[in-house]
Amino acid sequence: MKNNNPCVLFLSHGGGPLPLLGDEGHAEMVKTLKNLASKIDKPSAIIVISAHWEEDLTTITSGSNPSLIYDYYGFPEESYLIEYPCPGEPVLAGQIGELFNKSGIKNRLDKHRGFDHGLFVPLKIMYPDADIPCIQLSLLKNLNPADHIKIGSTLSRIKYDNLMIIGSGFSFHNMRAFFEPETIDSKAMNEKFEKWLIDTCSNQDIAESERVKRIENWENAPHARYCHPREEHLLPLHVCYGVHQTHCSEYFELRILNKKSSFYLW
């Protein structure tokens, strides 16, 4: 019997390859991902929406054996020797494209594009055997929240047993702030936005219409543009929310690169 109720996870994927290099600022992240992998049934396939891929229309990797894209700069040589030889899933990619067509979402399949670090870094931690077929899905360059919620809603109709959908972004993504000394004010701004985000995603007393309004209008949240000068690392969360369109079943608070961050599981 097909399970049409995919497990959905939004994760904060940290800074480039640093989680794989033993960086102390990612210790909590690595521990959280390993714990999650141990408590979730191992998926039959994984769809990853990465903050590091934007296209004019929704694009789906459809290659059988995608290569890796080392889309980071200035790291040690070992960062560019990382391997994660998981297979693709061309049949599932085609199914996704067909569903998008039926929903009026313009899309294309890309059999040549590889997997960027938004996929291979967290999955190498969670599933190091690289034996689960994966597909990567792009964000839209328009960065429109409602469009990304619709993408998630459409993904909810995939008929595939034991599917996992991962939004790989970062609940805090102000690059300048990562490299500046933390102040009382900067810490407060980070924490107030995280408090809002956790409440928005987890509060069971919020009417769903209000939750959608909050998520679509995330810029109105406390210190939203400090935490996300550009929203590409938050939008994978919109896709994740769109799949089930309800409060998350569990959330995880942690510090990554000395910033309060969060994960959400449906």
Image (cartoon, rainbow, N blue to C red):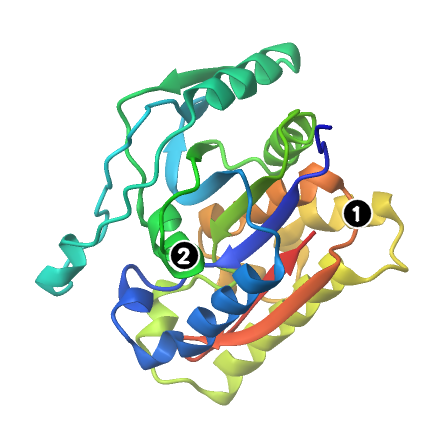
- Mark 1 or 2, which is nearer the eye? 2
Above or below for 27 versus 112: below
**Residue closest to the eye, 221 or 113:** 113
70 lies left or right of 208? left
Give x and y (percent) for residue 104.
62, 13
- The residue where tag 1 is placed is 246
| Mark 1 nearby-residue class (10 Å; few <14, some 14–19, many ≥20) | some
136 lies left or right of 250? left
In this rendering, the count of numbered labels is 2
Residue 140, visible in the rendered structure? no
Residue 38 in which image quadrant: bottom right
User: What is the three-letter code of the residue carrying label 1?
Assistant: Thr
Give x and y (percent) for residue 25.
36, 78
Using the numbered discs, state the Cα–Cα distance from disc 1 to disc 2 in whole angstroms.
Answer: 25 Å
Residue 222 in which image quadrant: bottom right
Task: Please name the residue shown 39% across and 47% down the image.
Answer: 119
- Secondary-structure class at tag 2: helix
- The residue where tag 2 is placed is 122
**Residue closest to the eye, 103 or 55:** 103
Task: Please name the residue shown 76% across and 44% down the image.
Answer: 212
Above or below for 149 versus 178: above
Task: Please name the residue shown 72% across and 38% down the image.
Answer: 5
Task: Please name the residue shown 40% across and 17% down the image.
Answer: 109
User: What is the three-letter code of the residue carrying label 2?
Assistant: Pro
* Quarter of the rendering occupied by the N terminus: top right
171 lies left or right of 229? right
Work out which residue is located at the far front of the displayed protein and give it: 1
Work out which residue is located at the far left of the displayed protein and give it: 77
